[in-house]
Amino acid sequence: MSAQHTPRRIKHPIHKGRGLEGVCILAGLVGYAIELDGIELLTADQRLELEVWAERTHLRASDNLVHLPPRPTWLPAPWAGAEDDWGRGPTPIDCAAIAKATGSDA
């Protein structure tokens, strides 16, 4: 089965990418909660941008020397919560609103 016909895979000429479930899990590792149904609303470029940023952010947090690209502009800033709130939880991502705002909900 080729990459073009593999269901739920990010298609890119060089980078085969993770499955959508993997990108959702990777986003969770850096503090963002994305539902599988929601991530399908993002463009392939947005998913790839999220995947690369989240992977490198996670690697950087483990003291690896990697180039950290800026957080995607369409991704909201992490939820800060109250100053005395321990274990704040992930920032939920509204992929439908992002798709609408970026014009990718066609």
Image: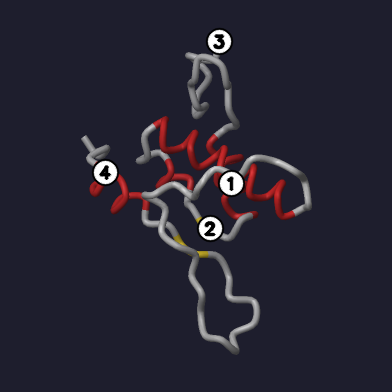
Q: Amino acid at mark 3?
A: Ser
Quadrant where the N terminus sits is top right
Q: Residues within 10 Å of mark 3 (few under 14, many from 20)?
A: few
Q: CA distance from mark 2 to mark 1?
A: 9 Å
Q: Earlier in the sequence, mark 2 or mark 3?
A: 3
Count of labels in the image: 4
Say if mark 2 contacts mark 1, CB within 8 Å: yes
Q: Position of residue 105 (x, y in %)?
A: 25, 39
Is 58 drawn above or below residue 11 in the view shown?
A: below
Left/right placement of residue 47 relative to residue 64 reads: left
The residue to which callout 4 is attached is: 102
Rendered residue at 50%/14% (across/down): 13
Q: Position of residue 36 (x, y in %)?
A: 48, 45
Q: Amino acid at mark 2?
A: Tyr
The residue to which callout 3 is attached is: 2
Q: Amino acid at mark 4?
A: Thr
The residue to which callout 2 is attached is: 32
Q: Amino acid at mark 1?
A: Ala
Q: Earlier in the sequence, mark 3 or mark 1?
A: 3
Q: Earlier in the sequence, mark 1 or mark 4?
A: 1
Quadrant where the C terminus sits is top left
Q: Earlier in the sequence, mark 2 or mark 4?
A: 2
Mark nearest the camera among 3 and 4 is 4
* Local secondary structure at mark 3: loop
Rendered residue at 64%/76% (across/down): 87
Q: CA distance from mark 2 to mark 3?
A: 30 Å
Mark nearest the camera among 2 and 4 is 4
The residue to which callout 1 is attached is: 54
* Local secondary structure at mark 1: helix
